[in-house]
Amino acid sequence: MSKLGLLRDHDFRQLFIADSFSQVGTQITLIALPLVAIVNLDVSNFHVGVLTACTTAAFVLVGLPAGAWVDRLRRRNVLIAGDIGRAILLASIPIAWSAGVLTIWQLYAVALLTGTLTVFFDVAYQSYLPHLVGRDNLVEGNAKLEIVRTASHMGGPALGGQVVQWLTAPFAIAVNAVTFALSAVFVGFIRKREPRPERGPDAHLGREILEGLRFVLGNRLLRAIAACTGSFNLFFGIFTAMEVPFFVRHLGLSSGQIGLYFSIGAVGGLLGVILVKPVVRWLGQGPAIWISTAVTAPFALLLPLAEPGWRTWLAAVGGIMISIGVVIYNVTQVSFRQGLTPERLLGRMNATMRFLVWGTMPVGGLLGGVFGQWFGARTALWIGAIGACLAFLPVFLSPLRTMRELPTRPDDEAPRDETPVPAAQG
C-alpha cells in the first residue's frame, strides 16, 4: 500500500483520474485536429502551421492576466469551468462537419478558444497542487501526474490513430469532448475546498501582474529556466508543426501508423518517471535540469533524416530519449518552482512562466508553417531539431550548472529582487 503514496488520498486520486481522462483526450486531438485540416479540408503546410500556432497563442494573449485572475479565484472552480468549456468547443467540430459547414476558420477559432481555457486550466492546475498535497509532497505529486501524462502519450496517440481510422478525424475529436466532460466530473468530486482568496482594498490587476513578473524575472534561477524552456519550445514548435505533414506527405504513414509513431516515443516518458529520482540524487537538482536536455535533444535529428522504412521507426525510437529528457527536466524544474514560490504568488508565477515559455510555441508553430511552405517540411524539421539541441545553454551558463540542491521558500514571504544563490555542493 505504501507504494500508492498520494493515491491513497481521496482528493488527489480524483485529480489523478480527471487528469487521466483529459490527457488521453488531448492526445487524440493532437492527431485528429491537424488530420482534419490536411485530409478533410486539404489545406497547405502554412495553414497547418497557423493552426498549430492557434493552439498555444493564448499563452501570449492572456497568459499574464490569467495568473492574476486565478490568484483571485478558487482554483477548483477554474478547473471545472475550463474542462466544460473545452468540451463544448470541441463538440462543435463534428457537428459542423456533419452539417457540411466546417472550415479552417472554425478550426482556428476552436484551437484559439480551447487554448485560452487551457491557459486558465494549466495555471490553476499547477497552483492547486501545493494546496492539495502540501509542499513536502510536490515531487511525488508531480511525478505521479507525470505518469498520467506519460501513459497518455504512450497509449493516446495509438488510440487516437485508431479512433481516427474508425470514426474519421472530425468525429474522433468528439471523443476528446467526452473526456473533458468526464474530467470536470472527477474534479467536482474533490472534497477539499480552498478559502476564497482575500483581495486587499488597493488590489489592482496591473500591479498584481507586475508582481508576478518581478518575482520570476528578478530570480536568476527562474530566468535561466524560462530562457531554456522558452527556446526549446520555440524550436520544437517549428518541429512539431511539420511532423504530421511530413508523416503524411513524405513518409506516407496512415493515421494508425502516425499514432503508433508517437506512442513509441512516449515510452520514454514512463522511463523518465522511473529515472527522475535516482538521476536527481546522482547528478544533483541543478545539473539534472541541464543535462537532461543537453543529452536527449539531439535525438530529434533522426526525424529529418528519416525515409520510408526502417529509418522512420528509428526516429520513433529516438523519441524515447527525448521523452526521458523532457520528463526529468519538467519534474525537477516544476517542483523547484512550486517549492520556491509563496502561496499567494503561485498563480502569477505559473502564469508568468507559461507566458514566457509557452508564448514562444505559437511563434514556433507559425515559423514552422512558413518554413514548411517555403523550404518543405523536412527543412523545417532540420531547423527545429538543431535549435532544440542548443536550448540547454541558458541553464548550463547559469549557477544551476553546479547546484546540487536548489533553494526553497516554505514561508509566504516574497523574495528580494535577486535571490541569493547557495554555494554549490560537490
Image: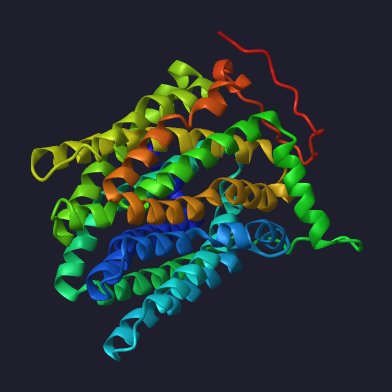
Residue 173 versus residue 391 in the image, above or below: below
Q: Give the answer, above or below, for where 346 lies relative to 300.
A: below
Q: Position of residue 156 (x, y in %)?
A: 27, 56
Q: Quadrant of the C terminus?
A: top right
Residue at the extreme top of the image, as rendered: 426
Whether residue 212 can be seen here: yes
Between 283 and 316, the one lying in front of the other is 316
Q: As drawn, which residue projects farthest toward the bottom?
A: 99
- Residue positioned 60% across, 57% down in the render: 60
Where residue 350 appears, x then y in whole percent? 62, 49
Within the image, what quadrant is residue 61 found in?
bottom right
Q: Residue at x 54, y 56 (%)?
A: 122
When asked about the image quadrant of residue 341, the answer is top right
Residue at the limit of the structure toward the front, as seen here: 374
Kindly identify the residue that appears in the image at 15 percent across and 59 percent down: 256
Q: Position of residue 139 (x, y in %)?
A: 51, 36
Rendering quarter of residue 46: bottom left
Q: Would residue 85 be found to the left or right of residue 266 on screen? A: right
Front residue (pair 64, 284): 64
Residue plotted at (50% across, 68% down)? 112
Does residue 1 show up?
no
